[in-house]
Each structure stands twice: as structure tokens, then as C-alpha cells.
Amino acid sequence: MRLEDFDFELPVELIAQTPAAERGTSRMLHLDGASGAITDRAFRDIAELVVPGDVMVFNDTRVIKARLTGQKASGGKVEVLIERVLSGDTALAQVRASHPPRAGSELVLAGAVRATVVEGGGGFYTLRFADCNDVFALLDRHGAVPLPPYITHAPDVFDETRYQTVYAREPGAVAAPTAGLHFDEALLDALKQHGAVIAHVTLHVGAGTFQPVRVSDVSEHSMHSEWYHVPQATVDEIHAARARGCRVLAVGTTSLRALESAGASSTLKSGRGDTNLFILPGFAFRVVDRLLTNFHLP
């Protein structure tokens, strides 16, 4: 499979820079896997496409304010994007600067936050923050929402709310699981009343999700790794759905990636881990029957 096989023209003017005024008012394209029929629908029609007893699996990760700007001790500008919080005072991050920072050097971020570069390599740096015992709290005070690179405006208070799902619980993502952004509480209630079973997984979306494929043969692409957790309650709901002949619907590719990683052996198991799963055409799905996903850049 060649990279050009997956390319398509996407006019810039078709990339929305702000969300719809209300969640759930977007359009939805429905592909019937059995017949191949394609139908234009409204997003709220999704309740009509779910059979009572089907399990819908949502990613409950919460986006952190992962972007920090500042300067090196030399005065050069730096931009830091936290990839993963490692401990109370340490994080793994991408650092953008005119010259890569050296181990032992100090960064001053957001005018007040001091961080020491512990080590670096492969595009990522380990940073230790001074006088800090909770990196999440530090980011909440001083960081900015890490909007995707195809969104051109600076993040504001509105983005802090809308670039977050209504069911986000577990902090750690640097990008939103965007398929879930369309759901509001009313739609979730409608799905439950219709008989859908709501379950959750956690996959902390990393900055690597925006990294392009740089090889011509896509099978040679090295996929970024992300941390996930599939709880036992979700495994139980999926096994129960299978027993009654119902389906598993993944809300977003991140939920799909977590479930298929946890089900990579002969049976789906609960647990935590890191996954670098890369799903290509021909992949044998073991857990998920249907996928809800946003349109993606080529």
C-alpha cells in the first residue's frame, strides 16, 4: 500500500475553524456496511442507527492545557507541548526552538514557570518543573489549550469548553477525541432511553496524532504510542452484548484503538498499557463492529 493511495484533495475553506453553535447540530454521513449504501443524515439521527442492546464505547480522556511558551536562558524563544505527565514534577514534551535545548539547561515558561531539561532525544524531552508537585495543576494555571495545527486562531475561553467532550473525566490528553465532541447530555440521554448501553475507555491522545506519515510504503510507518485503560466494567458490557447478539460501536478512532489493543489476543481483557497499534486496510477487527469518526485530513 502506497501513501498516495490514501491521499485526497481537501480545500482549506472546508475546514471549520469554529464549532457549530450547539453540539449535535452537525451533519453525518452514514455508510451501511452490508449494502454499501451512503446516506446524508443529521448527527442527532444516530439514535435511530443504534439497536437496543448495542454498546457504545466513549473515550473519557480529558484534554489538558498542554501548550506553554517562553524562552531559554539564552533568551531564545521556545514552545513546549506536553506529551505525557510522568510524575508530580516531571513531564515528557516536544520542545520547539531555533536550537534544541541541552540537558541541564533551564527554560522559563509563561513568565513564571521554571523547567530543567533532564534529557532529550527522538524529538521528545524530559522536563522537570521547579517547585511543583502537580504538573496538571501547573498546566491548568499557566498552559493553553493545544488546538490542532489546522485551527489557525489562538485558543480562548470558548475553546476551553468546546474542545472537550461533555463526559471528559481523566486528564492526560493533548488532543480531544473529536468524534465525541458532537454529543451533548440530551443526546446521551436519548441514546440511553433508546436502549443503548454506554461504556467508557480511556486513551490519552498524544501529540503524535498530528504527525504525518513520511514513508511511501505505509506499512513501514512507525505509529506513535499512547497510554490506554480498558476497565473491567466495559469488558463485561461488551461480553454481555455479544451474548445477546448485539454490536459494539466505537465512538472515535481512539476508542477503537484502545479496544482493539485490549482485544489483540484471543479475548478482550481489561487492563492498562501503551499501544502503537496501526490499523491498515485488511485489519482483522476482534472487538469493534461499527465506528463513528470525524472526517480526517489525508
Image (tube, rainbow, N blue to C red):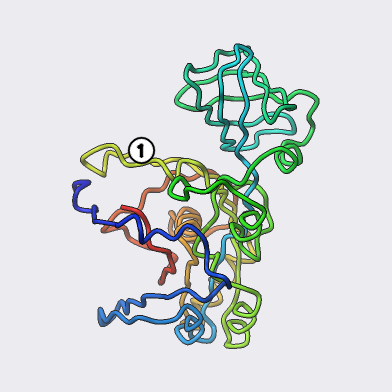
Residue 125 picture quarter: top right
Measured from the top left, where is residue 135 in percent x and y? 72, 36
Q: Nearer the viewer, residue 174 or 42?
A: 42
Q: What residue is rendered at 61% in x and 31% in y?
A: 69
Mark 1 Cα shell of 10 Å, populated few (<14), some (14-19), many (≥20): few
For residue 26, above or below residue 206: below
User: Callout 1, which amino acid?
Assistant: Ser
For residue 130, above or below residue 180: above
Measured from the top left, where is residue 70 in percent x and y? 63, 26
For residue 97, above or below residue 86: above
Q: What residue is rendered at 62% in x and 19% in y?
A: 117
Measured from the top left, where is residue 129 in percent x and y? 72, 26
Q: Nearer the viewer, residue 153 or 269?
A: 153
Measured from the top left, where is residue 296 in percent x and y? 37, 57
Q: Nearer the viewer, residue 191 or 71?
A: 71
Residue beneath label 1, please? Answer: 222
How many marks are shown on the rendered structure?
1
Q: Secondary structure at mark 1?
A: loop
Left or right, residue 220 beside residue 116: left
Q: What residue is rendered at 25% in x and 37% in y?
A: 215
For residue 228, above or below residue 14: above
Q: What residue is rendered at 70% in x and 39% in y?
A: 139
